[in-house]
């Protein structure tokens, strides 16, 4: 039985892209004080959440 504890493939890409977007948006928000960067932070968190959900669905979908 192989147990994959870390995401691979598309889920990994979504998690990493979401985390990077959220971090970039947070940094830009603190530097510029423009509230429009909150949308990038929210989008990054949303994409990261989708990546973790896809990773969880991949793990539950296989035969035990």
Image (cartoon, helix red, strand yellow):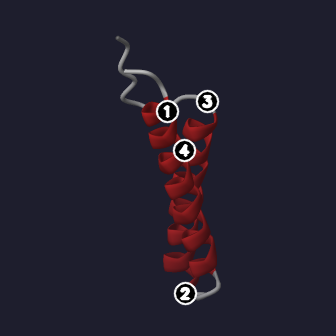
Residue matched to label 3? 9
In front: 54, or 8? 54
Does label 4 or label 1 sit earlier along the sequence?
Answer: 4
In front: 36, or 10? 10
Does label 3 or label 2 sit earlier along the sequence?
Answer: 3
Q: Nearer the viewer, mark 3 or mark 1?
A: 1
Q: Nearer the viewer, mark 3 or mark 2?
A: 3
Question: Residues under labels 1 and 2: Cα distance?
Answer: 44 Å
Whole-percent x, y for residue 1 in the image: 34, 11
Task: Indicate which disc residue 54 carries.
Answer: 4
SS for dot 2: loop
Q: Using the image, determine if residue 33 lies above or below residue 5.
A: below
Question: Residues under labels 4 and 1: Cα distance?
Answer: 10 Å
SS for dot 4: helix
Does label 4 or label 3 sit earlier along the sequence?
Answer: 3
Whole-percent x, y for residue 36 in the image: 65, 85
SS for dot 1: helix
The crowding category of the residue bearing disc 4, from other C-alpha atoms within 10 Å (few below 14, some 14 to 19, many at least 20), is some
SS for dot 3: loop
Marks 2 and 4 in Cβ contact (< 8 Å)? no
Residue matched to label 2? 33
Task: Indicate which disc residue 61 carries.
Answer: 1
Does label 1 or label 2 sit earlier along the sequence?
Answer: 2
Question: Residues under labels 2 and 4: Cα distance?
Answer: 33 Å
Which residue occupies 60% across, 46% down? 14
């Amino acid at each position: 039985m192989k147990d994959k504890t870390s995401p691979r493939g598309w889920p990994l890409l979504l998690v990493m892209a979401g985390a990077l977007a959220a971090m970039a948006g947070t940094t830009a928000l603190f530097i510029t004080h423009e509230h429009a960067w909150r949308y990038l932070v929210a989008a990054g968190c949303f994409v990261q959440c989708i990546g973790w959900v896809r990773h969880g669905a991949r793990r539950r979908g296989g035969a035990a």
